[in-house]
Image (tube, rainbow, N blue to C red):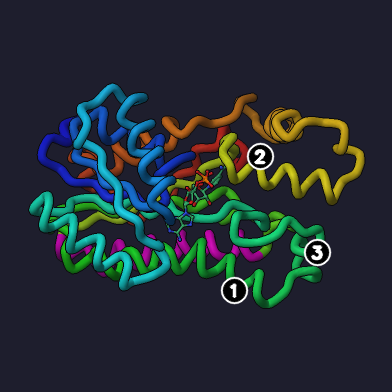
């Protein structure tokens, strides 16, 4: 797939799944801009992505921007247009997995709905749904006709997870936003599609397994990685975790000319978890 001369913006991509998506687009020749929340994260992320993808320095760069903040995102878009001349693909990846993040203390009280505060509910909606809305809102006026938006939701959008009620609701919102934007942007030949990742060993799961060990004392003697592996083993029909490249490969396909008639679609990359 040829992404030479294509400009791709990926939110929350200094590490984790977003960094994997960045590596996949860069490997296809795209000019990639990643956003994240602070400069140190961006500097390390850009260096790691470039090294791991084996690409020239300057092909991947970064901008500090909160994906839930339209002013930040509009400023990032202006910088990209000034530097690159166009913007062809937006990947709405920024999100905070589960109830525990750098934004909030790990707390056993934030799991099921009955233990959740209004503040935690709002935070989950802000960082997992408004991120996609605000970034799309800022990017769409500048996005090339014929371009593409790829939204990253979650298998938590496809069925209830009792311990992740706000996260699941936010990601279900991302699914709905995908279908709505697909119709709104079709006259400009901009396609909008969605990926629901399953289980990936990123910082999000490092935090989530810490939370699980607080809530389930029987897990206390296991390492976080062992807790994650036991979840993968218990619920994944294909029997393994997913990698950021598994997500990135579909993002690249969605954004490519090969998918020119695909819009408004939701695909789980989850080893079969969501069909069990
Ligand atoms: N890891 C999984 O198993 C999994 C499963 C399903 C869905 N997801 C989704 O995939 C996406 C990426 O998750 P991950 O596992 O790579 O998480 P991660 O925590 O490893 O990486 C997310 C990155 O996004 C950044 N970020 C968070 N909020 C931001 C904001 N408002 N603006 C800019 N940057 C922001 C963080 O600083 C971090 O660098 C998220 O939307 C997450 O909900 C992850």
Residue under numbered circle 2: 276
Of the numbered discs 2 and 1, the one sitting upstream in the chain is 1
Residue at the (45%, 44%) spot, across then down: 267
Circle number at residue 109: 3
Against 54, residue 243 (above or below) is below
- Which residue is rendered at x = 38% and y = 31% of the image? 48
How far apart are the two marked residues, 3 and 1, measured between alpha carbons?
Answer: 15 Å
Q: Secondary structure beneath disc 1?
A: helix
Q: Residue at x 38, y 68 (%)?
A: 133
Neighbor class of circle 1 (other Cα within 10 Å; few <14, some 14-19, many 20+) is: few
Q: Residue at x 43, y 45 (%)?
A: 41
In the rendered image, residue 142, in percent from the top left (x then y), is placed at: 16, 63
Q: Nearer the viewer, mark 2 or mark 3?
A: 3
Toward the viewer: 9 or 196? 9
Q: Secondary structure at mark 2?
A: loop
Residues marked 2 and 1 touching at CB (< 8 Å): no
First of labels 3, 1 by sequence position: 3
The mark found on residue 27 in the picture is none
- Please indicate, yes or no, whether residue 218 appears anywhere in the rendered image: yes
Q: Which residue is mark 1?
A: 122
Q: Position of residue 141 (x, y in %)?
A: 18, 68
Structural distance between the alpha carbons of marks 2 and 3: 29 Å
Does the stretch in magenta take in 110?
Answer: no
Q: In the image, which residues are magenta?
A: 166-188
Toward the viewer: 213 or 271? 213
């Amino acid at each position: 797939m040829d992404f030479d001369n294509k400009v791709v913006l990926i939110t929350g991509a200094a590490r984790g799944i977003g960094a994997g998506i960045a590596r996949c687009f860069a490997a296809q020749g795209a000019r990639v801009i990643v956003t994240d929340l602070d400069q140190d994260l961006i500097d390390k992320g850009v260096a790691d992505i470039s090294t791991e993808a084996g690409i020239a320095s300057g092909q991947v760069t970064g901008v500090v921007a909160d994906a839930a903040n339209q002013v930040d995102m509009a400023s990032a878009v202006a910088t990209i247009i000034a530097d690159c001349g166009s913007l062809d693909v937006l990947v709405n990846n920024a999100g905070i997995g589960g109830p525990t993040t750098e934004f909030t203390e790990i707390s056993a009280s934030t799991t099921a709905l009955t233990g959740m505060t209004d503040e935690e509910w709002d935070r989950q909606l802000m960082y997992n749904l408004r991120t996609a809305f605000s970034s799309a809102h800022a990017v769409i006026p500048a996005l090339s006709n014929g371009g593409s938006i790829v939204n990253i939701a979650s298998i938590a959008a496809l069925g209830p997870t009792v311990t992740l009620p706000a996260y699941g609701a936010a990601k279900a919102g991302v699914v709905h936003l995908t279908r709505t934007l697909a119709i709104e942007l079709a006259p400009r030949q901009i396609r909008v599609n969605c990926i629901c990742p399953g289980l990936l060993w990123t910082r999000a799961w490092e935090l989530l397994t810490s939370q699980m060990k607080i809530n389930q004392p029987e897990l206390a003697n296991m390492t976080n990685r062992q807790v994650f592996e036991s979840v993968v083993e218990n619920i994944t029909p294909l029997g393994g975790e997913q990698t950021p490249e598994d997500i990135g490969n579909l993002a690249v396909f969605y954004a490519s000319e090969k998918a020119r008639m695909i819009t408004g679609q939701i695909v789980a990359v989850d080893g079969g978890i969501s069909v069990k």
